[in-house]
Image: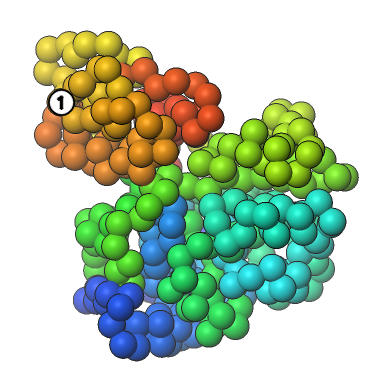
Amino acid sequence: MLCPVDVILCMAIFETQVISEQQNGAVSAAVQQLSAGNLVAVPTETVYGLAADATESSAVQQIYAVKGRPSFNPLISHVADASMAKQYVKISPLAAKLMKIFWPGPLTIVLTALEDSGIAPEVSAGLDTLAVRCPAKETTRAIIAKLGRPIAAPSANPSGKLSPTTADDVLAGLRGKIPLIIDGGDTPVGIESTIIGVRDDKLYLLRPGTITSDDIADATGQPVLDRDETEISAPGQLLSHYAPNASVRLNATRKQQGEILIGFGDIAGDLNLSASGDLSESAHNLFKILRKADSKSERIAVAPIPDRGIGIAINDRLRRAAAPRTEP
Ligand code: AMP
Ligand code: MG
């Protein structure tokens, strides 16, 4: 339930300003807005994030209001480094090892939250865990360090829709709803972070990403177990998500009438995720090409993507993009 003040805030109309990360004062401008309890869209290496001071309930509530995000879907807290994370979550030796190997980078780790950590309860949607990540994007780490507190930041788009990989994508979805976007160019990774749960010295894959289970198992010497083998709750990964306006048909080897075909490898298509069949390039291009296809046709078909390595994460996003649409 939103209280009246939040309703007023979420109806606020802003003239959304876009500042290049290279412009003098970009970091300070972002920190000023965040300190004032406002939202700022920030670049990360995965997709653009819609950031709020994670310790301010009213700011975090605005994320849910602006995105139209269901209140049961918890947010990832982005930290400047592992020592900032330590102020908010219990870090086991295994979690410390993950941070040392993969941070900064596109790996989110779900850990037990410290009591009275000061993180707004809305961030975890009432769970006793907190998801933490240290982004590789330096500008955003500088913003967090200067703020001195974590930022809660889901993708900077209306809930359930395609994730934004450029400042223009953010503007297309959120113009007038937020005061500031920091433009950090095209996001290199292109899809959301891998999410790993750590409990009782075991690792669980809660969401696949470009850091694969094999990468994590190789680096830690520990197997990565499936999500259905854990009691860790990771609500909010809805079947319909990342949805363009168009319908989406998967595993298409040729297009049917009225469709635009997104190709991969040998299947050329009208647009192509990666002509050479490179999965990392395909992840980088995924949301970009889905957006482009969405602007050209009401029916999108997508070539088969191998279900291994990074392909597992791409197929996860594609399955949700193709799922029957539900109201957010
Ligand atoms: P998004 O911000 O949309 O990329 O999604 C973040 C996802 O991270 C959520 O949908 C949850 O599945 C997961 N998540 C965030 N916080 C937690 C948490 N405390 N415990 C378990 N999963 C979480
Ligand atoms: Mg999202």
Q: Is residue 209 above or below residue 16?
A: above
130 up-or-down from 141: above or below: above
Q: Position of residue 297 (x, y in %)?
A: 14, 29
- In this rendering, the count of numbered labels is 1
Image position of 91 (left or right of 266): right
* Residue at image coords 81%, 62%: 90
148 or 220, which lies in front? Answer: 220
Residue 226: tell me if it is visible.
Answer: yes
Taking depth in this image into account, of 124 and 93 the one nearest to the observer is 93
Compare residues 12 and 249 and report the one nearer the observer: 249
Label 1 CB less than 8 angstroms from ligand 2: no
> What type is the residue that disc 1 sits on?
Asp
The colouring scheme, among rainbow, by chain, secondary structure or one colour, is: rainbow
Q: Residue furthest right?
A: 200
Image coords of residue 121 (percent x, y): 66, 65
Q: Secondary structure at mark 1?
A: loop
Placement of the C terminus among the 4 image quadrants = top left
**Residue 257 found in image quarter:** top left
Q: Position of residue 112 (x, y in %)?
A: 79, 56
Which residue in the structure is indicated by mark 1? 270
Classed neighbour count for the residue bearing mark 1: other residues with Cα under 10 Å, few (<14), some (14–19), many (≥20): few
Q: In the picture shown, does residue 251 fall above or below 230?
A: above
Q: Quadrant of the N terminus?
A: bottom right
Q: Position of residue 32 (x, y in %)?
A: 43, 87
Residue at 38%, 47% (x, y): give it: 190
Report the residue at 54% width, 70% height from top. Answer: 151
Instruction: Please name the residue shown 79% across and 38% down the image.
Output: 222
Q: Is residue 119 visible?
A: no
